[in-house]
Image (cartoon, rainbow, N blue to C red):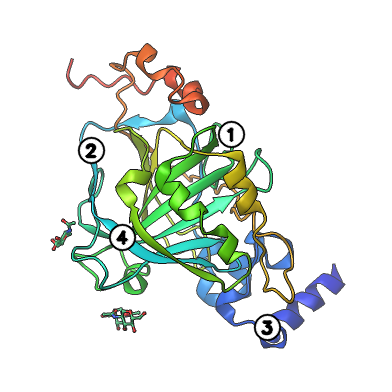
Amino acid sequence: MDVTLLLLFFLLKFPGFYGLSWEEWWTYDGISGPAFWGLINPEWSLCNKGRRQSPVNLEPDKLLFDPNLRQLQVDKPRVNGILTNTGHGIVFTVSNGTTEHHVNITGGPLAYRYQFEEIHLHYGLNDQFGSEHSISGYSFPGEIQIFGFNSQLYSNYSEAVHKAQGIVVVSLLLQMGDLSNPELRILTEQMEKIKFRGNRAEVKRLSIRGLLPETDYYMTYDGSTTMPSCHETVIWLILNKPIYITKQQMFGLRRLMQGDAKHPKAPLGNNFRPPQPLNHRPVRTNINFHFVDDKSMVGKQCPSMRKEVHYKANSWKYHS
Ligand SMILES: *[C@@H]1O[C@H](CO)[C@@H](O)[C@H](O)[C@H]1NC(C)=O
Ligand SMILES: *[C@@H]1O[C@H](CO)[C@@H](O)[C@H](O)[C@H]1NC(C)=O
Ligand SMILES: *[C@@H]1O[C@H](CO)[C@@H](O)[C@H](O)[C@H]1NC(C)=O
């Protein structure tokens, strides 16, 4: 214990010793792992003190049907951008100036217009883990998070991430399947090129809309970013159907490394933060369980979420 503390102290005092900047100096395990993020850097204190943190475990029988929730809208235009191995995960960032129009994310629970900014990919080194959000304690092999910032109130992502109503994240759970989502393939095709930290690859003509599974249903709650600095400015939407990734694509992801070519360190996968307490936050849904015909939702389209289909939401009398 003493030795660990001493080492922690040393590392905290001299992160530069390892050639790392503050922004890089956190991990998904060990003494710089999620339990310590809030202690490493005062600017990240919400990671430990925050009470509206993400991800969370979603309990379908505790969802609250909200008839005010609208359909989520994501603009159609394809975007160009850069895929980067950050050493913490894989991030696709939209390039400026390449699209005439920004891809907007609106509707759903959102009171403002959000501008698509980036995609984060979290995944496991085996199929049992990988997603950040879980459903009834069940984790998926991966999770794709589509980030937008509030472009009506703020001028860019870095400003919005600190501010009220700043960020939306649309989250897609990844499931293993024989046929991949075609837009996901555009990203996974580049994995060979980003094996090490700092590697970048150009991605052309990606459709954000095309990444989404075919569903109008989602769950939504207010939370935080799942990486330092854990700001509690995120409106989360978790779609109720997964998208599919093949074994081969997953194999490609699992070959990526946290370090550079000289010091590759550990594999990049297993880059997920464990679930955080809900602390009485409601998780709302636009699925009106009372009226959904169960049979229409049970089937091959959504095998992994079948469990929650027979959940009853509170018996809402709206419409009846
Ligand atoms: C657009 O991107 C280029 C290259 O990354 C950068 O130099 C420039 O400042 C950016 N422009 C705006 C308006 O953000
Ligand atoms: C997104 O919203 C902005 C601001 O209203 C608009 O200029 C732009 O055309 C929208 N993008 C698309 C693809 O419609
Ligand atoms: C983001 O917007 C703020 C406020 O307008 C500005 O000070 C900052 O330089 C911008 N950051 C980037 C990366 O463009």
Question: Which quarter of the image is occupied by the C terminus?
Answer: top left
Tell me where residue 41 sits by quadrant: bottom right
Asked if the residue at label 3 sits under 8 Å from ligand 3, the reply is no
Q: Nearer the viewer, mark 1 or mark 4?
A: 4
- Circle nearer the N terminus (2, 1): 2
Q: Position of residue 265 (x, y in %)?
A: 74, 68
Q: Amino acid at mark 2?
A: Gln
Q: Is residue 16 above or below residue 211?
A: below
| Residue designated by label 3 | 15
Q: Which residue is mark 1?
A: 138
Q: Could you tell me which quadrant the N terminus lies in?
A: bottom right
Pointers 1 and 4 in contact (CB under 8 A)?
A: no
What kind of residue is marked 3?
Answer: Pro
Q: Report which residue position mark 4 lands on.
A: 79
Q: Are marks 3 and 1 in contact (CB under 8 Å)?
A: no
Compute the Cα span from label 3 to label 1: 36 Å
